Amino acid sequence: MSRLICALCVVMALAGCGGGNKVSPRNLDNACSIADQRPKYLRAMRKTERKWGVPVPVQMAVIHQESRFDGDARTPLQWKLGVIPMGRQSSAYGYSQALDATWDQYKSETRNRGARRDNIRDATDFMGWYMNKTREKNGIPLTDARRQYLAYHEGWNGYARGSYRSKTWLVNVAGNVGERAVLYDRQLRSCGKI
């Protein structure tokens, strides 16, 4: 009997060492609800705002668009002949959907070698780093969620070339991100979270 209890204790201890809650919160249209369900998310975003200056609602709106707050989010698989998996559309992964090369650049420049894209603290710190580079390279204010998102999606050089102009769908998505940032800001102020 004591062996069974011991084994259960070991299993429970190992289960507690998991990677955390990567499942999306409920009611993604309500920033206060997200903050209440995942206070760790709000703490991470506040820390990023203090460090990098990117407002919490801007971070939330971009994460909503990129991953719907799913730490395990990946791009869809590509298929050949409709049945043979040929890999993913890109290397984008995690809350921020950072690509491998950009994530590696972030880790190198910030000396955050252990950073993981499925960790909300690392993902928001990445976004702060990236958006600050966008401000430096492209002159986009950190408060401009719409244009920050366009540069986030297209990359610094793509944004500078105006590659988004021929992508009506992307311009519409960026508009939605901007509107969501305004909505999240209003909600977070109403519930006293910012």
Image (cartoon, grey):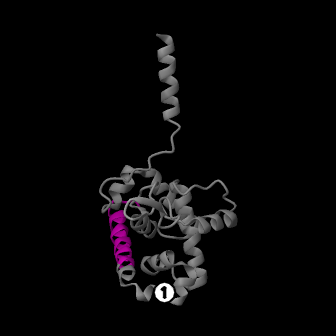
Whether residue 178 is in magenta: the answer is yes
Rendered image quadrant of residue 164: bottom left
Percent of width and height locating residue 167 = 40, 84
Residue 134's place in the image compared with 58, above or below, is: below
Q: Residue furthest top?
A: 1
| Residue pictured at 46% horizontal, 76% vertical | 149
Q: Position of residue 157 (x, y in %)?
A: 57, 83
Magenta stretch in the rendered image: 173-194
Image quadrant of residue 78?
A: bottom left
Q: Position of residue 16 (x, y in %)?
A: 49, 35
| Amino acid, disc 1 | Ser
Q: Is residue 103 above or below residue 38?
A: below
Magenta: predominant secondary structure element? helix
Q: Is residue 17 above or below residue 73?
A: above
Task: Say if 176 sits above or below 46 in the image.
Answer: below
**SS for dot 1:** helix
Label 1 packing within 10 angstroms: few (<14), some (14-19), many (20+): some
Residue 35 in the image, given as x and y percentages of width and height: 39, 55
114 with respect to 21 (left or right): right
Which residue is located at x 65 percent, y 62 percent?
Answer: 107
Q: Is residue 150 left or right of residue 29?
A: right
Question: Looking at the image, how many numbered discs can be counted on the residues?
Answer: 1
Depth order, front residue of 54/74? 74
Q: Residue at x 39, y 78 (%)?
A: 174
Q: Quadrant of the C terminus?
A: bottom left
- The residue pinned by badge 1 equals 163
